[in-house]
């Protein structure tokens, strides 16, 4: 698989590059960072050699099969659409895009041209997550009623890329972070989110981040069967503070508590709490999952339609936070 890469202004680009280099069936044939200032900020230890000045130049001069896009968030939608128009498969870090209309166009074009679009929703790719999914699907806690999800991150002012704090580039913290929680609950339960009951995003007094930046963000969503999720995904963690993702699921017969340090506890009425043994990891990296689909036609662990549905729910939650709308129906895609 011949891979072109565009955008190296997020640390996740380095992870994709390293994985691509390690796979013997992937050849990185072009690397582009279009911003002149950002070119000098790529860590030298990654060994990335920039080959072109623009993505359009790559399209004109290079034969390749797939694009890895890790540019700043608001730039991704237009780049992904341009790649699909040119007949290329696409993989991105999350989020895929920052506008609902962009997502509609991406989905339509990828289906029309039978192209793969993959979003690195990494949280699914663990034995602990698989164990949680099996427990919920097997009815270990009965019918799910509510879920609370915490995805707190440090602001990392001074080390996080500066574009996060430039107007119009990050696109909102719910779409940035809570897409992981949304995707996990969709996957674990097998159910879709149907409405955004409410959402909010705000600055934090005394923070060095600009006032428009949604350092604190929350959303309240409803699933198609009536189960509800409250999510808090914010940039509020003090430096050095322990902050794994945390999931609390309550059902008609018990509860599950899971965090991404691989702690999974089952509690059922009248029984002692149980630390659940975890399944083995699926043994595949998200980028490798994408690459094996492209090169070998392998059945994906995470398919593009799942990526589209999780992205659509996150974008609607972000829309509600930005606009103040309540009881917002999530568009089917």
Image (tube, grey):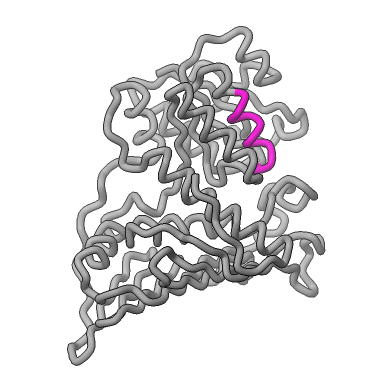
In the foreground, 240 or 273: 273
Q: Quadrant of the N terminus?
A: top left
Residue in the picture at 51% in, 18% down: 87
Q: Residue at x 66, y 45 (%)?
A: 99
Stretch of the chain drawn in magenta: 73-82
Residue situated in front as seen by the camera: 21 or 137:
137
Q: How many marks?
A: 0
Compared across the picture, whether 58 is left or right of 203 comes to left
User: Residue 78 magenta-drawn?
Assistant: yes
From the viewer's perspective, tell me whether residue 330 is left or right of residue 165.
left
Assess whether residue 93 is covered by the magenta stretch: no
Q: Residue at x 67, y 17 (%)?
A: 56
The image position of residue 15, as x and y in percent, is: 48, 39
- Camera-side residue of 199 and 91: 199
Q: Position of residue 240 (x, y in %)?
A: 56, 68
Q: Main secondary structure of the magenta part?
A: helix
Tell me which corner region of the image, top left, top right, bottom left or bottom right, holds residue 39.
top right
Residue located farthest toward the top when viewing the structure as drawn: 61
Residue drawn at point x = 52 percent, y = 42 percent: 93
Does residue 240 sit above or below 166 in this rendering?
below
Q: Position of residue 246 (x, y in %)?
A: 43, 70
Q: Is residue 134 above or below residue 73?
A: below
Return the x and y of residue 139 as percentages of the image width and height. Answer: 22, 70
Q: Is residue 35 left or right of residue 175?
A: right
């Amino acid at each position: 698989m011949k891979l072109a890469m565009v955008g190296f202004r997020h640390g996740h680009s380095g992870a994709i590059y390293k994985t691509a280099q390690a796979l013997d069936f992937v050849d990185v044939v072009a690397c582009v960072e279009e911003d002149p200032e950002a070119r000098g900020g790529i860590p030298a230890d990654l060994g990335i050699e920039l080959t072109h000045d623009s993505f359009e130049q790559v399209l004109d001069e290079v034969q390749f099969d797939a694009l890895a896009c890790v540019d700043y968030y608001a730039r991704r939608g237009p780049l992904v659409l341009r790649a699909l128009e040119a007949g290329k498969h696409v993989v991105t870090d999350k989020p895929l895009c920052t506008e609902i209309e962009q997502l509609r166009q991406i989905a339509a074009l990828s289906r029309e041209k039978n192209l793969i679009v993959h979003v690195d929703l990494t949280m699914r790719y663990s034995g602990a997550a698989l164990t949680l999914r099996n427990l919920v699907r097997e009815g270990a806690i009965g019918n799910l009623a509510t879920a609370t999800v915490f995805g707190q991150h440090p602001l990392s002012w001074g080390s996080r890329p500066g574009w996060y704090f430039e107007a119009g580039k990050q696109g909102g913290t719910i779409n940035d972070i809570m897409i992981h929680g949304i995707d996990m609950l969709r996957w674990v339960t097998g159910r879709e989110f149907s409405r955004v009951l409410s959402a909010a995003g705000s600055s934090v007094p005394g923070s060095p981040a600009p006032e428009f930046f949604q350092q604190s963000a929350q959303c309240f969503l409803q699933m198609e069967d009536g189960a509800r999720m409250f999510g808090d995904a914010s940039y509020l963690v003090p430096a050095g503070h322990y902050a794994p993702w945390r999931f609390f699921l309550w059902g008609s017969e018990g509860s599950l508590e899971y965090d991404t340090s691989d702690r999974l506890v089952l509690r059922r009425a009248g029984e002692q709490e149980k630390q659940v043994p975890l399944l083995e990891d699926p043994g595949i990296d998200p980028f490798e999952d994408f690459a094996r689909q492209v090169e070998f036609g392998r059945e994906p662990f995470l398919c593009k339609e799942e990526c589209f549905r999780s992205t659509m729910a996150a974008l609607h939650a972000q829309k509600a936070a930005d606009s103040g709308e309540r009881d917002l129906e999530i568009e089917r895609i």
